[in-house]
Image (cartoon, coloured by chain):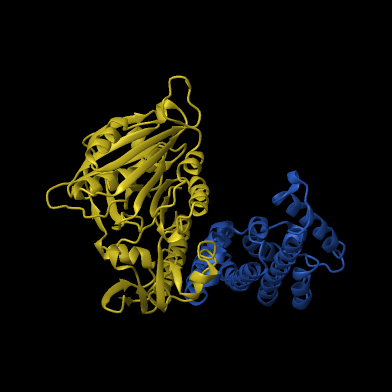
Amino acid sequence: MTFNPLVVFFAAIFTNNMIFSNFLGMCSFIAVSSDIKTSIGLGQAVTFVLAITAPINYLLYHYVLVPFGLEYLRYIVFIVSIAAFVQLVEMIVERSFPSLHQSLGIFLPLITVNCAILGVSLFMTIRNYNLITSTLYGLGSGLGWMLAIVALAGIKKRMKMSAVPEGLQGSGITLIITGIMALAFIGFSGIVQIS
Amino acid sequence: MGKIFTTLLIFSLFTGFLAFLLTLAKKTIGNYGTMKVTINEEKEIEMEGGDTLLSGLTEEKIFIPSACGGKGSCGYCKVTVQSGGGEILPTELGYITPEERERGIRLSCQVKVKEPIAISIPEELFLVKEFHPTVTAITDLTPNIKHLLFSFPEGEEITFKAGQYVQLRAPKYPGNSEEVFRAYSIASSPAEHQKLELIIGLVPDGICSTYVHKHLSIGDSVTITGPYGDFYYQDSNREILMVAAGTGMAPILSILHQMKAMDSPRKAAFYFGARHEEDLFFLEKMKEFESNLVSFEFIPSLSKPHNEADWTGQLGRVTTCLQRDLMDPCEREAYLCGSPRMIDSIVEVLIEKGIPEEYIYYDKFS
């Protein structure tokens, strides 16, 4: 079955959002969402890494692993290539955007183990996307992840002024907000089929 | 067999390629070369690009005070950056006031040297050196306060002003995985250049004080840097008022030693606050100062004596004593040492009693 790349792209942002329908990439989503500017920065970094690693992992999988019958190595290969590109992104960010580098702190290297990124690489191989679809799927997932974290940061900024019950402050209320946001997004699921 | 071989070969080629790519990136993107740092418009040093200003200066044996070891959590390592260094970082904002920001003050542990930088630091910091003295005596002053005596090896000499402090390094030890520096006021006489005394109180869960109280023993060698601080004895004819509690006695002792060495005729009073009888120490030493100095009075005050009937000194908090004693208008200057809360309340009383703020010197122990 082939999918329209554009449909996959938009589905990855809205109806099949990484955070709200797959619950992948939650740790940095919750931890770095207290400031809109920082979350935009992390969102951009995640989008960049996703858009690059999706086609690279596609090529690795179909032109290196499959011909040699080494598909079972895909986890380790994907993780290593993701790690290398995160390292590269970190060097670039440190050189060009020191302020962003400081505010992202440990979460930039932690993109390496952001499940959303490995998730994209695995989904695209399981769903048999072609190269263009995979690339757009990676880009869309990144944008979707950024949309989610920026939206959460915006809500959290307003939450600072509200009286949250003591037991729910911090991550408690954040998870509840995420759940409610997910309900809104899941309402659109099923409109398009991407798997 | 062939399968294992191809697997290994392909995987090695793949990881090798990535390693090559990253090394190439490190050589180009991550390489800042050596950078020139100009200090106080006269001294020029070369620094490894990409390093923090603090670690670069430490390598050049210029010691900026820092308690946390460059993690950006103490806010001590402030320097004035005149040019270069980039924008102020979010990690610094909590420690730099808007007015300091105007003047270009930055935390040197957060500034990365990626371009030529010009900074200015106080001249005194050039006098700061690293020393490796040996512990020669440890005495218990109270259940929680120890008195330590250090002697310097051949060739090391410290010169400081009475009232200044040094930083003591706590190394890694069982239960502590990080190296930290903590500030302690010098209790010995500035005339002694090869001996140093410190008074160190045990802070619950304190990394350095636990090291001193539980792990340090006679004969051990320690690392200290110093001297630091703008709290020191000032020459004038004003009457001296000294107030301290607990380990705050250390810099006062140094000042008293200095006064004795100068045979100072100045009138001086030292109010020492404590809770119980066992929190008092060096009473003998204070008696000696009382008889050796021209006009010196030691006034201990207990807020909660166990045995009120037997206690002959002052009763209540130091602030109450000051309220009562400072009735006569006369030219005074004050030296205060203790917790920030205590100092704030005393400064309030002293200003109310007519001591001008510029003559109130204090060292907040926090």
Q: Residue at x 43, y 20 (%)?
A: B310
B217 vs B51, nearest the viewer? B217
**Display colour for chain B:** yellow
Query: x, y percentage for residue A112?
Result: 56, 61
B344 vs A164, nearest the viewer? B344
A20 vs A93, nearest the viewer? A93
Name the image quarter holding residue B286.
top left
A173 vs B227, nearest the viewer? B227
Q: Residue at x 67, y 70 (%)?
A: A138
**Display colour for chain A:** blue
Query: x, y percentage for residue A127?
Result: 72, 64
Q: Quadrant of the C terminus of chain A?
A: bottom right
Query: x, y percentage for residue B61?
Result: 26, 63
Number of residue marks? 0
Q: Residue at x 48, y 57 (%)?
A: B3
Report whether A42 appears left or right of A141.
Answer: left
Using the image, determine if residue B153 lies above or below residue A34: above
Report whether A51 appears left or right of B204.
Answer: right
Using the image, determine if residue A138 lies above or below residue A71: below
Q: Quadrant of the N terminus of chain A?
A: bottom right
Using the image, determine if residue B207 lies above or below residue B18: above
